Image: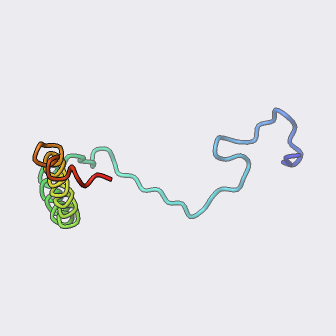
Amino acid sequence: MGGGGKRAPGSWIGDWGNFGLSRQRGIVQYTLAANRQVPTANLVKSAIFNGFRRFRGQVLYITPPFVGIYLLMEWANKRNEFLNSKAGIALYADEED
């Protein structure tokens, strides 16, 4: 059950991530020295221009549905107010099912 060779219970099988298996190859890690990292370089400038570029690219996809939904809700609210007013009740009172 759960093979593993001739290891006795309690025997050490290796460090975490290396349980007696062969080493992985082909994994490359790159690092940058701490004194070379400048996390806030051009932060404000990049945020403004990149934000505007992203906004400009998406505004034609986002704006029309919102405008359409706003106009639909505006019409529905006005229609609801009219139908629940005295004039609307008098006009449509005889059409009830």
Look at 19% across and 61% down and name the residue there.
68
Q: Is residue 74 left or right of residue 30?
A: left
Q: Nearer the viewer, residue 97 or 64?
A: 97
Relative to 5, residue 54 above or below: below
What x and y, as percent, mark residue 42?
15, 52
Could you say where residue 80 lies in the image, as x and y percent from the top left?
A: 18, 48
Residue 67 occupies quadrant: bottom left
Q: Height in image: 25 above or below 44?
A: below
Q: Quadrant of residue 86?
A: top left
Q: In the drawing, does residue 21 fall left or right of residue 85?
A: right
Count of numbered badges drawn on the protein: 0
At x 42%, y 56%, the residue is: 30
**Closest to the observer: 54 or 22?**
54
- Residue 65 coordinates in the image, percent (x, y): 22, 62
Image color mode: rainbow
At horizontal 70% and vertical 56% (from top left) the residue drawn is 22
65 relative position to 8: left or right: left
Residue lying furthest top: 10
Q: Residue at x 71, y 42 (%)?
A: 14
- Could you say which quadrant of the image residue 16 lies in? top right
